[in-house]
Image: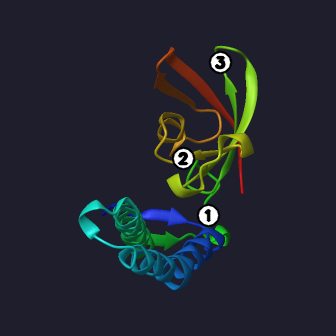
Amino acid sequence: MSDIQYVTKETFEQMRAELQHMRSVDRPAASRAIGEAREKGDLKENAEYDAAKEAQGLLEARIAALEGAIATARIVDESNIDTSKVSILTKVRVTNLNTKKQVTYQIVSEKEADLKAGKISVGSPIGKGLLGKQIGEVAEVTAPVGVLKFKVEEISI
């Protein structure tokens, strides 16, 4: 994960809190589970021990991934966002030229994406297509259903 990930301050703090919880609560719990399973006898035939070791390995992988994400995260200050073009953290109202429906999306990092909340990833096909567009421009996005055309109507924070 060497790609820079742009996040809001709130998301960055959530990531740090999650990492701290994994290190201070989940990691000791995994160690205790291994210790308890070890006390139950022969390790060669101890399924509980194997499961505890596997859970610990998965936890360590999640910790490493989150550490990497935090190391490459860059906090974006909303007060410095240029609303003359679509960029990360901007809200963009677009018209789907195929269906004539208007939709508002906020362009966010992969970590913050939530389609139900109208937040789409900067790395998604629509996010990539809209990035850098100005009001009045049309973004052509290749999707499994074909080429979608979105006209940028409004850009805000």
Q: Residues within 10 Å of mark 3 (few under 14, many from 20)?
A: few
Q: Of 104 and 15, which appears nearest the observer?
A: 15
Return the x and y of residue 18 as percentages of the image width and height. Answer: 57, 73
**Is 117 on the left or on the right of 139, as rendered?**
right
Residue that mark 2 sits on: 121
Question: Residue lying farthest left?
Answer: 44
**Disc ID at residue 43:** none
Q: Earlier in the sequence, mark 1 or mark 3?
A: 1
Secondary element at tag 3 = loop
Which of the two discs, 2 and 1, labels the residue nearer the N terminus? 1
Neighbour class for label 1 at 10 Å: few (<14), some, many (≥20)? Answer: some
Task: Please tell me which of labels 3 and 2 falls first in the chain.
Answer: 3
Q: Which residue is mark 1?
A: 81
Quarter holding the C terminus is bottom right
Say above or below: 44 vs 30. above
Q: CA distance from mark 2 to mark 1?
A: 17 Å
Q: Amino acid at mark 3?
A: Leu
| SS label for mark 2 | strand
Amino acid type indicated by mark 1: Ile
x 34%, y 73%: residue: 41
Question: What residue is shown at x 39% (from left), y 69% (from top)?
Answer: 56
Location of residue 64 with respect to 90 vertically, above or below: below
Q: Is residue 43 left or right of residue 145?
A: left
Q: Label 3, on which residue?
A: 97
Q: In the structure shown, which secondary structural element does the residue marked by tag 1 occupy? A: loop
Structural distance between the alpha carbons of marks 3 and 2: 21 Å
